[in-house]
Image (cartoon, rainbow, N blue to C red):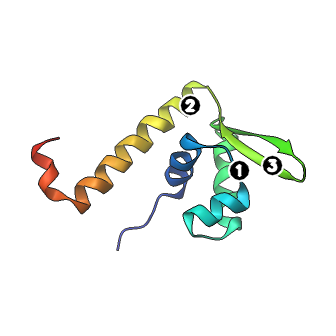
Amino acid sequence: MEQKDYKLEIIDVLLKKNWHIRALAQKLKTNHMLVLRRLKELYDENVVDYSKEGKNNVYFLKKTPEAKSYIFITENYKLNKLLKKHSFLRKIV
């Protein structure tokens, strides 16, 4: 069984829309504390930032070189997951 890389999963979700912690956790089907820890790591690495909306912190991707690097890594991660699931696509890629 392969482990998920939750940092990359979070970035993949944040590419589509800005989310708060509990919504991210629900979307990833995990608990909010794991998401919070990974978001703190990404925040410390200058990849994500947040804004206050009411009581919630809404997280979004920053426009920094670090964030762009993580986006490329996320796209490669998604491609590898797809190729593991559908090996016949290897000929095309």
Q: Which residue is mark 1?
A: 40
Q: Amino acid at mark 1?
A: Lys
SS category of the residue bearing label 3: strand
**Dot 2 surroundings within 10 Å: few (below 14), some, or many (20 or more)?**
some
Q: Earlier in the sequence, mark 1 or mark 2?
A: 1
Say whether disc 3 or disc 2 marks the residue closer to the N-terminus.
Answer: 3
- Taking the spot 29% from the left edge, 51% from the top edge, the residue there is 80
Residue situated in front as seen by the camera: 59 or 70: 59
Residue 44: percent from left, percent from top: 69, 42
Determine the secondary structure under disc 1: helix
Mark closer to the observer (3, 2):
3
Q: Secondary structure at mark 2?
A: helix
Q: Residues within 10 Å of mark 1 (few under 14, many from 20)?
A: some
Which one is in front in this view, the residue at disc 1 or the one at disc 3? Answer: 3
Quarter of the rendering containing residue 76: top left
- The N terminus lies in quadrant: bottom left
Residue 27 x, y percent position in the rendering: 58, 62
Q: Position of residue 90 (x, y in %)?
A: 14, 48
Residue with the mark numbered 3: 57
Specify few, some or many for label 3: CA neighbours under 10 Å numbering under 14, 14-19, or 20 or more: some
Residue tagged by mark 2? 66
Q: Quadrant of residue 85?
A: bottom left
Which amino acid type corresponds to the residue marked 3 in the rendered image? Asn
**Answer yes or no: do the residues labelled 1 and 3 have beta carbons within 8 Å?**
no
The residue under the point 36% across, 68% down is 2
